[in-house]
Amino acid sequence: MATTEDSADLTEECDECGQQTPHDVSVEILTESRKRENAEFSREPYRVSECLVCNTTTKLRMNNA
Ligand SMILES: [Zn+2]
């Protein structure tokens, strides 16, 4: 399985810090389990950004279906 993970340092607004801080941003494919009738697992790309100041990790789903 290929791991597509690209990483870049970006400056973004951090809610915890309340200001623009450097972030380590990467994309991860996370497996979600949806508890519905069918236990269906879907893999969704998430944009993971970690504040390098307070180490808060924010995961943002990229496919907003
Ligand atoms: Zn922060």
Image (cartoon, grey):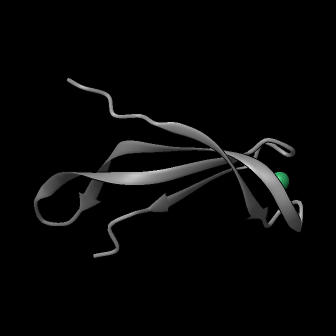
The answer to whether 42 is drawn above or below residue 53 in the figure is below
Q: Residue furthest bottom?
A: 65
Residue found at x 48% / y 53%: 47
Quick check: 24 left or right of 17? left
* Residue occupying the point 88% across, 66% down: 19
Q: Position of residue 38 (x, y in %)?
A: 10, 60
Please name whichever residue, 1 or 32, is drawn nearer the observer in this view of the structure: 1
Q: Quadrant of residue 18?
A: bottom right
Q: Is residue 4 above or below residue 40?
A: above
Residue 37: percent from left, percent from top: 12, 65
Describe residue 60's horizontal placement relative to residue 50 as left or right: left
Residue located at (32% from left, 67% from top): 63
Residue 60 lies, in percent from the top left, at 50, 61
Instruction: Spot the residue most to the top.
Output: 1
Seen at 24% across and 26% down, the residue is: 2
Residue 31 as seen in the image, left or right of residue 11:
left
Q: Residue 24, image x and y in percent? A: 66, 42
